[in-house]
Structure formats: structure tokens, C-alpha cells
Image (cartoon, rainbow, N blue to C red):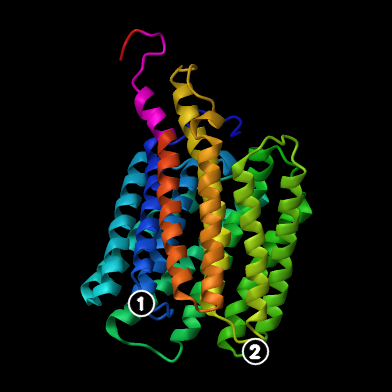
Amino acid sequence: MFVGLSLDQAPPYKAPIKFFLIAPIFSFIAGVFALFTSSFEIHNPNIIATIHLVTIGFIIMTILGALQQMLPVIAGAVIPNAKRVSNITFTLISLGLVAFTLGFLLYEKLYFFLAALMLLSGLMYFTVIALIQLFKVPNKSYIVKGIIISLLFFIFAFLVGIHLLIANATSNISALHYDFALLHYNYIFFGFLYILIVSISIQVVPMFWVASAYKKYEQSLLILLTTTLLVFYPINLFMNLGLDIVYKILLTLSIFYFVYLTIQKLQNRKRKLKDITVYFYITSMLFLAIGSAYWVAMSFFTLHTSLLGILLGLGFVVSLMNGMMYKIVPFLTWFHLNAKGLFDIPSMREMIPQKNMQIQFYIHLTSMVCLIIGFTFSINIIIKLAAVLFIVSNALLFINIYKAVQIYLKNQHRDPFGMGK
């Protein structure tokens, strides 16, 4: 895993770790908000705050932590002054998300503008630095191209999101507000998250789980077809071409292909030890397939919009990121302690007990099932139960990954020669 990574290339241990630790805390708070929400309508300010506590607080924070660690490895792009970049990004996004949440809860314009300023500054600061380093990489693979494309879509989607946020703050809702919201959702999910996950999966599925590699034509088809469809999307949207269903079907077929390839590689992996992270990854792929089919079905039937967010946002993205954290955090702990000359430390598999991860996996999965049932049949008590399970799941995720972090904290100042601290 991470073959050839040196301590000089890697960011300091605490640079990515703080992003991983705060992510489940934000999701925990989102669960508490959902638990005490009376209406689950998408336009409810409480629900908007809850959604963004997950999307920015959990998903974006996890991605930023992972990119800091992975860019030197999978792309050869080293973030300069990694500690400073990490601290500035972390502070701005954390404070920006707090302001964003207060803005929607209190509906105070000042908080909206503070949120827009801090979130824009923090996310653009990291993204631009990452893109500069990625553009410097010679002989760019499809993995590097995919990450660059995803970050460019992210910048565009985020600027549209800032426009929507300011429109809310000034009560200046234009006739195109809904179209801009659709563009924001599509570019954040498919342009940024999906293409980024495809690009990273091409590298980490073979690396983490000793599976067969994605072939070049598979990589190009997955990344370039999705990119082409997303470039076409705003043309169709703003020119009223009426080709939404064509866009949806083609993109969904591409997604099905990715799901098929990934599950096949995981099932046929060479090292078939029991690994809960594989459960998370396969679960996320299944939710991606179901969610994409549901998205297409919404063009033909009147279906609950919230269910789409549950299937794709929580079922696909959050499930995958739970599994990724269980891989990355133990590795970082082992790698940094090993680099200090400490060899009498737990192995990566020993840092977080499989049983603990398994319990959290089943609670997470049960919360997803309860959310689906609750929203499908409009049963509030089931939705509340799902919120409780979601809270417990994120509390356990934090406790589990903190077990690995504790190993680092207890050993970071140890003398490898036993001469004292």
C-alpha cells in the first residue's frame, strides 16, 4: 500500500488526521438536527443545514483529508507547506460551515455572507493549490486527469452554490434559481464526487485490496464519457433542448459499468481475508446503482426527492468514505510511527478491531434501510429511529478511528532505541 511513499513526500500526520476526526462529529450533529426536525421538506432551513453538515462537514472534510495524503501517491503531486495549507483550509471550512448552519437556523444575512466568504476562501485555497501541483505532473494518467476534471467541476459547482447562497441572503430569487440549483447538484455529485471517486478507485481498489487493475479503455470510458455528458448538461438545461432523459440514461449506464467493474474486482481480489472495508465499498456500489436507477425513474414517476439524496449521498458516498477512513487512518498511523523507527507497534489490521468496525457497519447499514423505509412510506417514527442510528454510527466511527490515532499519540515521542521519551 502506497508503495514508494517517503516521509518527505507525505504531509505531517496531523495535517490530514484532523479532517478525518472532525468529519464524523459534523455528521453526528447533522443526525441530532434530523432527530429534532418536525418537517423533512427539502426547503426547510433546518434540513438544508442538516444536508450541508453531511455534504461539507463529512464528505468534503473527508475528501480534503484523503487528497492531502493521496495526491503525492496516486498523482505524484506534493502539496507544498502541507501543515500551513491544512491548518488554513481546516479553520476556514469549519468556521464557514458553522456560519452556514447558523445562517439557515437563524436566517441572519450576516451569517450567510460570512459562510460564503470563509467557505469560498477555504475551498478555493486548497483546490487551486492542488490543481497547480496536478497540472505540473508530467505524462498525466487517467487518474490524474480524472482528479483535475473533478476539481474543476467542483470550482464551478461551488461558485454556483455561492450564487445560490447569496440569492437566499438577499432574497433575490431569479426565475433561473431552480436551474442553477440543478446545475449545482449535478456538478457537485457527478462532476466532483463521482468522477473523483472513480479516479481514486482506479488506483486504490487494486492497491488496498490486491485486486486486478482497471484497463486503460475502462478508465478512459468511465472518466471521459461522464465528463462529456456533464459538459452537455448545462447546454441542455439552459437552452431547453428537452434531452434530460437521454443525459440521465447514458450517465446511468456509465455508472452501472463502473459498479459492475468495481464489485467484480473486489469479489475476485487475490487476498480474501475478512475485511469490513470491502463490505463498505460493495455496499456503496450497490447504493450507487440503485440510486442511479431511481434517478432515471424520477423522470417517469412522481417519487420522493429526499430518497435520491439518501441513496446517493448517504448510501453511496458516506458508506464508501467510512470504509476508506478505516483503511487510511491505520495506514497513516503505522507509516508515521514506522518512519520514526518504531517497529513494535500494532499492524494496520490490529489498530481497529474488526469486530468494532463490523458493529458500526451494521448500524450504518440499518440506518440507511430505516431512512429508505421511513421516507418511502412517510413514517416519521422510522425516520427518527434512522436518525438515532445515524448518530450512533458516527459516534462509533469517531471512536474507532480515534483508537488508531491514540496509538500514534502514545508513541510519537518514543525513542526507538528504548532510551526514554
Badge 1 crowding class, 10 Å Cα cut-off, few under 14, some 14 to 19, many 20 or more, is few
Mark drawn on residue 241: 2
Q: Residue at x 72, y 73 (%)?
A: 250
Closer to the eye: label 1 or 2: 1
* Side of 218 relative to 324 (left or right): right
* Side of 326 relative to 259 (left or right): left
* Front position in the image: 396 or 332: 396
How far from the left and from the top, in percent, is residue 304? 55, 80
* Front position in the image: 274 or 270: 274
Q: Looking at the image, tell me whether mark 1 or mark 2 is earlier in sequence order.
A: 1
Looking at the picture, does residue 86 appear above or below residue 386?
above
* Side of 336 relative to 168 (left or right): right
Looking at the picture, does residue 347 appear above or below residue 164?
above
Instruction: Tell me the kind of residue under disc 1.
Output: Ser
The residue pinned by badge 1 equals 38
**Secondary structure category for the residue under label 1:** loop
Which quadrant of the view contains residue 173? bottom left
Q: Is residue 289 visible?
A: yes
Q: What segment is highlighted magenta in the picture?
A: 404-418
